[in-house]
Amino acid sequence: VAAWIIDWQLPAAGDPMHDVAYFLSGSVSPEDRRACERELVTEYAGLIRRTAPDYTEDEAIESYRRNVVSGLWLTVIACSAIDQSEHNTALICALMERNCA
């Protein structure tokens, strides 16, 4: 059985590490992210090599580093677009802490 996830929130063709960086920077605690990010980026790069054999681990790591700030700027944008409620404030604060770390 196979499962596929299609995220249509921000559809675009581009850097494959963008979604990885965005997910890890906002959805995982800084401590957990630091413990696994290199291994996950390396594993993801291996999956990309199935269709792009020239894609290197070094390229993936550098791309991840460039993209990891994307979560921060999206969080800043979200601040102006969401209602100010206790729940939303807690969410934004958690995202800001994770993305700044």
Image (tube, grey):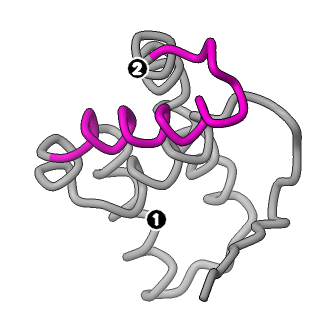
**34 relative position to 69: left or right:** left
- Name the foreground residue: 85 vs 3: 3
Residue occupying the point 88% across, 43% down: 12
Residue occupying the point 55% across, 28% down: 67
Q: Which amino acid does label 1 sit on?
A: Ile
Residue 45 % position (x, y) = 49, 32
Residues shaded magenta: 36-56
Residue occupying the point 22% across, 59% down: 29
Secondary element at image label 1: helix
CB within 8 Å, label 1 to label 2: no
Report the quarter where the C terminus lies: top left
Determine which residue is flagged by label 1.
92
Q: In this view, does 97 lie above or below 42?
A: below
Badge 2 crowding class, 10 Å Cα cut-off, few under 14, some 14 to 19, many 20 or more, is some
Badge 1 crowding class, 10 Å Cα cut-off, few under 14, some 14 to 19, many 20 or more, is some
Residue occupying the point 80% across, 31% down: 14
Which mark is in front, 1 or 2? 2
Q: What residue type is labelled 2?
A: Ile
- Name the foreground residue: 88 vs 46: 46
Residue 1 % position (x, y) = 60, 88
Determine which residue is flagged by label 2.
61
**73 relative position to 56: left or right:** right
Report the magenta stretch's main SS: helix
Q: Was residue 54 drawn as part of the magenta stretch in this picture? A: yes
Q: Is residue 32 above or below residue 83?
A: above
